[in-house]
Amino acid sequence: MDARRFLGKTVVITGAAHGIGAATARRFLDEGARVAAIDREADGFAGLEAEHGRLLAVAGDCTDAAALADFHARALAAFGPVDVLFNNVGQSGRERAVEFHASSEEVWRFVLEVSLFTTMRMARLVAPAMRERGCGRIVNMSSDAAFVGDAGLADYAAAKMGVVGFTRALARELAPFGVTVNAVAPGAIRTRAHDRLAPGVIDRIKAGAPAGFIAEPEDVAGCVAFLASDDARYVTGQTLMIDGGRWMI
Amino acid sequence: MTAPLHGRRILVTGAARGIGLATLARLVAEGASVAALDRDAPALAALPGRLGRALGHFVAVDVADAAAIAEAVRASAAALGGLDGIVNAAGVDLYADIEAMAPADWDRVIAVNLTAPFFVIRAAYPFLKAAGGGTIVNVSSAAGLSPLRNRTAYCASKAGLQMASKALAIEAAAFGVRVNTVCPGAVETELFRSSFASAFPDAPDEGAIRDAVRARYVLNRIAEPEEIAAAIVWLSGPESSYVTGVALAVDGGRSFH
């Protein structure tokens, strides 16, 4: 494996200031890419910027269509056409998670907006140029929670299964143009969302997957980099589970 | 960055041609020590010359022969000083409608594609457990995810291999051993080309056959063995550290798994 598989490539990552997004941004930077990253909390980029001169870090909200279009325009201006899009942004709204019978439409709308529509919106921005150039890689963030259907996360499961269907349809549409579209579906990854959980819950999560441990964001970054690399050029329309074996159907 | 698989000791079955050979070459290129098993002794003997460097170990053996496989795996582990991974790439294909398929045909497909990987895994398991961070990659098929006409035995054997791998992934996780399958679509191999006559008896020429095969995949092409090897090697290394029990389709967009 060439250690700099993304030399000269332009990579766009949403939700990149923390956790999986940040680990993936670092990974692409380490392998030579120019990375355009957007996050609501741009102060989280500080560590990345100090190390690399190939990072465009933009403070912005992916649920704001105008802000996302502006981010895309700035990425193009800085680094040229997008070779790889990693649609990472999303969240379960876990602090407001309740069983469905007690849930509110306001929260569904938030979860679907941030975990599904942001993915569609960013893909819509890059797809025309990828079609035209006859190359490109899109990796979308799903979740094994979409397959498991965890109690209390019905809206999140719906959004992340939406990502799976979107991934498949877009893979079919873009295949004739040499563009692959895949999804990753992580399970328990050590991120800020996990750090807020009670120790008992953490133990239950660990025991819930055969692997018996909670993975690091870097474990996901390795998978995203694979799907974005030339090595995965014959892989499209797939959803790769990264969950230590929690869901195997 | 050092070669990512440097120091890993990996055994490959069906290593003399096709996907197995491409996997072997990629493993060697990434710094792994390898053992190569194949029933084709002359092809195996030619491998070190083809790969441009000496291999760790190679054994001419039929994977369907349980006793011989156990001995070949033990000898390979002894030669390499242990085993960190195995790749079960040996396989056979069969095109036959249900009435044309003799019971012996069915038995042979199941024996080579489903039972033989189990023989290899069982023999290698103590070494993988001892190594820590072991990997098992079984080469299944997209036909084990999404069925194809006149392939009942083949599809069943490949689907069975996936489920055996998933079940094993649960118990193997206790030892830090990951178990995954790769599910290729059509790949430019001798096995694929040898199927043309039985798979497409009415096709006017090879071009028509290739067109028909390509049309199954949204990427509209047939894969090279190296493209499957890339996924196998990725699943055999540290990059896929939290991936176990998956069936990764490298199928140009057919199964949408």
Image (cartoon, coloured by chain):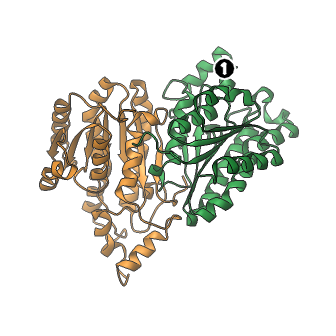
The answer to whether residue B159 shows anywhere in this view is: no
Q: Quadrant of the N terminus of chain B?
A: top left
Residue most extreme to the bottom: B204
- Viewer-proximal residue, B118 or B48? B48
Check disc 1 and report the residue beneath it: A195
Vertical placement of residue B217 versus B59, above or below: below
Which color has been applied to chain A in this rendered view?
Answer: green
* Amino acid on which disc 1 is placed: Asp
Vertical placement of residue A33 versus A232, above or below: above
| Residue A137 percent coordinates (x, y) | 57, 52
- Viewer-proximal residue, A60 or A153? A60
Vertical placement of residue A58 versus B116, above or below: above
Q: Residue at coordinates 59% horizontally, 43% vertically from top-left?
A: A34
Q: Is residue B63 left or right of residue A93?
A: left
Q: Residue at coordinates 43% horizontally, 39% vertically from top-left?
A: A3
Q: Dot 1: few (<14), some (14–19), or many (≥20) neighbours within 10 Å?
A: few
* Total count of labels: 1
Q: Is residue B107 left or right of residue A133?
A: left
Which color has been applied to chain B in this rendered view?
Answer: orange
| Residue A49 percent coordinates (x, y) | 64, 30
Vertical placement of residue A6 versus A96, above or below: below
| Residue B3 percent coordinates (x, y) | 35, 36
Q: Is residue B92 left or right of residue B177?
A: left
| Quarter of the figure with residue B70 | top left
Q: Residue at coordinates 34% horizontally, 68% vertically from top-left?
A: B95
Subunit under mark 1: A
Q: Residue at coordinates 46% horizontally, 32% vertically from top-left?
A: B241
- Viewer-proximal residue, B13 or A62? A62
Mark 1 residue element: helix
| Residue A127 percent coordinates (x, y) | 67, 58
Q: Is residue A50 left or right of residue A91?
A: left
